[in-house]
Amino acid sequence: MTKQELETCIHEYGKEIYSFCRHLAGSVQEADDLYQDTFLKAIELQEKIDFGDNPKSYLLSVALRIWKNRKRKFAWRKRIADVRPITEETGMQVCAPEELSPERQVLGRETQQLVRQEVGRLPDRLRVIVLLFYMEGLSVAQISGVLNIAQGTVKSRLYQARKLLEKRLEDVLNG
């Protein structure tokens, strides 16, 4: 991949990669770091990236690998000396169609916030697949390639995540 092709990737997929990093990391500061490190690693590995072979999936897998490594390092450090991370709790703005009444807009935002919270509470192995499938719009085959797991495993984890979310959201929404 040439520098020009890498710049094209940044312009074409940058927002989607950042959004994925934001959902993975949970805070703006950590997402910024993850996003920057992802593209720094892409620059470092630019000879290995095939521009014609879905560079978005490759960049998502790089971001995921960096995030997993950081998480593993943090867990190791936490075992040695417990540290409490500083996190930002910022709500994401949701744009609702203008024809909806204010009440429906508020209910829609609250429902979306509940769904985001429940997705955030999923175990990492399920949450990552949900984010890749629904947020990034990757197919089961693409997710399989990004995570280096079998397609059947991706389908199974997606099914597990859906069932778990359905149960949790049913409990929350029905009281």
Image (tube, rainbow, N blue to C red):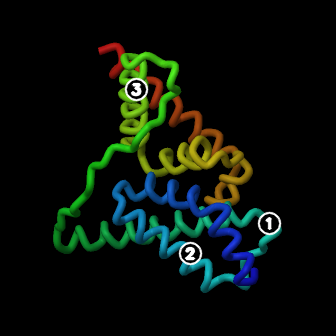
Q: Quadrant of the N terminus?
A: bottom right
Picture coordinates of residue 40, whole percent (x, y) = 54, 80
Is residue 109 visible in the rendered structure shown here?
yes
Q: Which mark is residue 39?
A: 2
Q: Earlier in the sequence, mark 1 or mark 2?
A: 2
Amino acid type for the residue under numbered disc 2: Phe
Q: Is residue 107 above or below residue 146?
A: above
Residue 58 horizontal/vertical position (percent):
67, 66
Q: Residue 153 has which mark?
A: none
In the foreground, 129 or 50: 50
Tell me the element at label 1. Answer: loop
Between 64 and 124, the residue placed more toward the observer is 64
Q: Residues within 10 Å of mark 3 (few under 14, many from 20)?
A: some
Mark found first going from the N terminus, 2 or 3: 2
- Between the C-alphas of marks 2 and 3, the distance is 34 Å
Q: Is residue 146 above or below residue 92?
A: below
In the rendered image, which quarter contains the C terminus?
top left
Camera-near label (3 vs 1) is 3
Direction from residue 111 to residue 44 in the image, left or right: right
Mark 3 lies on residue = 111
**Residue ID at (21%, 62%):** 86
Q: Amino acid at mark 3?
A: Thr
> For residue 51, which quarter of the picture?
bottom right
| Foreground label between 1 and 2 | 2
Residue type at tag 1:
Asp
From where the camera sits, is residue 153 visible? Answer: no
Precedes in sequence: disc 3 or disc 1: 1
- Asked which secondary structure carries label 2, the reply is helix
Q: CA distance from mark 3 to mark 1?
A: 37 Å
Q: Which mark is residue 53?
A: 1
- Furthest residue in direction right, as rendered: 52
* Disc 2 residue crowd, few under 14, some 14–19, many 20+, Cα 10 Å: many
